[in-house]
Image (spheres, helix red, strand yellow):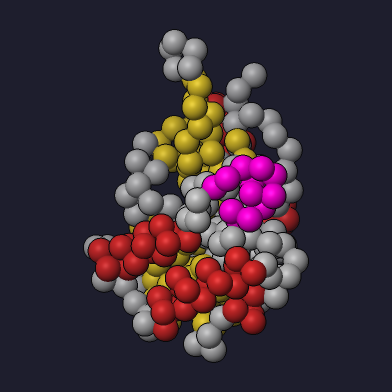
């Protein structure tokens, strides 16, 4: 496996320098919000932790970075989040060499859920091996702009695709700025059951990190989880 940044096949995760697995937007406890709206969703945290473990084992990695939104409740901690993190993630964290979290906008009061070995960084991000990792919901630290790559989450990007028969579907995608430095990657959500932003449908959204980098989403390159390059967002805009 080569050095640098590698997208894993069919999973929304990155590998940095053959050492770190990076994921974003797990949204543990999201089921509670849906149930309160009358949508009965089975508990999915076991599936999330199993997928993480499979990735770590497949690529023989002992270092994990969560780029924001480990949990779902924006302010405070729900009982479901507390139970789920304790049951399904604490042992996973304890068995790894390193675990890092950049808090996202959904990670209020997350510190009380985590073992001491989990390194919780500033919301403005942190550097590892020349990469800057942040969630993207707030401004970046000034050190970020000198790095080769900036890796973000937050908006759960998908594109809407319509086939020749008129049927439409959405698919998770990576967004990348390729032609300028720092290179920027926006990760798809690791939790495939949470809401998404359809980036080619003119939906408005706020992402302070992109504004600060003077990046327009329409000028970013789109790649599916299967590795298909769809070109620039602006060429995929749905009218």
User: Viewed as shown, does residue 205 lie left or right of 29?
Assistant: right
The C terminus: image quadrant: top right
Segment tinted magenta in the rendering: 30-41
| Quadrant hosting residue 94 | bottom left
What residue is at 64 percent from the left and 48 percent from the top? Answer: 34
Residue 58: image location, x then y, percent: 25, 64
Does the magenta-highlighted stretch encompass residue 34?
Answer: yes
Query: 211 or 77, which lies in front?
Result: 77
| Quadrant hosting residue 56 | bottom left
Residue 65 in sight? yes
| Quadrant hosting residue 126 | bottom right
User: Viewed as shown, does residue 219 lie left or right of 228?
Assistant: right
Residue 142: image location, x then y, percent: 68, 71
Query: 165 or 236, which lies in front?
Result: 165
What residue is at 66 percent from the left and 42 percent from the top? Answer: 38
Residue 223: image location, x then y, percent: 43, 40
Residue 232: image location, x then y, percent: 52, 34
The N terminus: image quadrant: bottom left
Rendered position, 7 above or below 230? below
């Amino acid at each position: 496996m080569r050095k640098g940044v590698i997208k894993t096949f069919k999973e929304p995760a990155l590998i940095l320098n053959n050492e770190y697995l990076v994921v974003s937007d797990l949204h543990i406890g999201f089921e509670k919000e849906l149930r309160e709206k009358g949508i009965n969703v089975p508990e999915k945290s076991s599936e999330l932790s199993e997928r993480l473990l499979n990735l770590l084992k497949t690529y023989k990695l002992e270092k994990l970075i969560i780029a924001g939104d480990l949990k779902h409740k924006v302010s405070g901690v729900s009982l479901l989040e507390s139970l789920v993190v304790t049951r399904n993630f604490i042992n996973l964290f304890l068995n790894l060499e390193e675990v890092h979290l950049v808090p996202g906008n959904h990670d209020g009061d997350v510190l009380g859920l985590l073992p001491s070995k989990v390194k919780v960084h500033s919301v403005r991000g942190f550097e590892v091996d020349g990469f800057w990792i942040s969630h993207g919901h707030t401004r970046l630290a000034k050190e970020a702009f000198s790095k080769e790559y900036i890796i973000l989450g937050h908006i759960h990007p998908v594109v809407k695709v319509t086939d020749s028969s008129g049927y439409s579907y959405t698919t998770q995608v990576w967004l990348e700025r390729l032609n300028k430095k720092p290179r920027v990657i926006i990760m798809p959500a690791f939790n495939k059951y949470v809401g998404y932003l359809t980036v080619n449908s003119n939906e408005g959204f706020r992402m302070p990190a992109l504004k600060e980098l003077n990046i327009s989403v329409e000028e970013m390159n789109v790649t599916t989880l299967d590795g298909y390059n769809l070109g620039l967002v602006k060429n995929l805009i749905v009218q």
